[in-house]
Amino acid sequence: MENEKLWYVVNTYSGHEEKVKENLEMRTESMGMENNIFRVIIPEQKEVEIKDGVRKEKVKKMFPGYVLVEMIMSDEAWYVVRNTPGVTGFIGSSGKGAKPTPLLPQEIDKILANEGINNMEVNTDVEVGDSIQIIEGPFKGMFGKIETLDTENQKLTVLIDLFGQETPVEVELTQITKC
């Protein structure tokens, strides 16, 4: 686990997430920790609220009071993060100087996917016309043919047989496997 880039959950004072992110990014740069501390994100999600017939989009924090930090856990990196103003500690640490446990890959992949960030290696050896099977999502288990491919956004349109008709559906590259 040493020298491995992993994601950790950092507890902050509630409402100070943006300030902690800013402080941590500045400290990373000023203390020369760019090779140990990589990304700091505040997971957010959009919510649509309809009030008095007016539709408003709000961005809400998924985990108020927490930021996620991608880092290689070392004594120096741990110290920099732990002593950043506004940080109260790491989640998964028993305290007393114990190093925290990182998030599991499937946990961080879900959070990053919601943020529109991809953390997984994606199968890009597919092309228009290839036969595929959908392995995740609402069309799981269905077979189809790739109609369009958008590698930049990691999405594709697949023609599947739905109630006897060829129907185009949009899926992500992570949701398919080549036949």
Image (cartoon, rainbow, N blue to C red):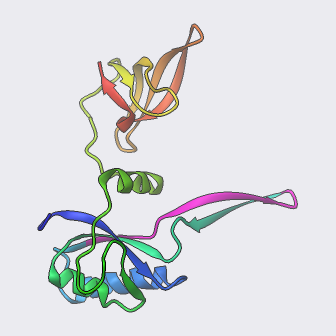
Residue 171 placed where, x, y %?
A: 45, 33
Indicate whether 65 appears above or below 109. Answer: below
Indicate whether 174 appears above or below 159. Answer: below
Indicate whether 66 appears above or below 22. Answer: above
Instruction: Work out whether residue 85 or residue 151 is closer to the camera in this orientation and state it.
Output: 85
In the image as oriented, which residue stretches furthest toward the top? 164
Quarter of the picture containing the N terminus is: bottom left
Quarter of the picture containing the C terminus is: top left
The answer to whether residue 67 of the structure is visible from this angle is yes
The residue lying at 19 percent from left, 73 percent from top is 73
The residue lying at 87 percent from left, 61 percent from top is 52
Q: Does the magenta run of residues contain 41? A: yes
Instruction: Work out whether residue 165 or residue 87 is closer to the camera in this orientation and state it.
Output: 87
Residue 26 placed where, x, y %?
A: 31, 86
Indicate whether 83 appears above or below 171. Answer: below
Report the magenta residues as a range.
Answer: 38-53
Dividing the picture into quadrants, the one containing residue 83 is: bottom left
Dividing the picture into quadrants, the one containing residue 21 is: bottom left
Q: Main secondary structure of the magenta part?
A: strand
The residue lying at 49 percent from left, 17 percent from top is 160
The answer to whether residue 29 of the structure is visible from this angle is no
Residue 31 placed where, x, y %?
A: 20, 89
Residue 11 placed where, x, y %?
A: 42, 79
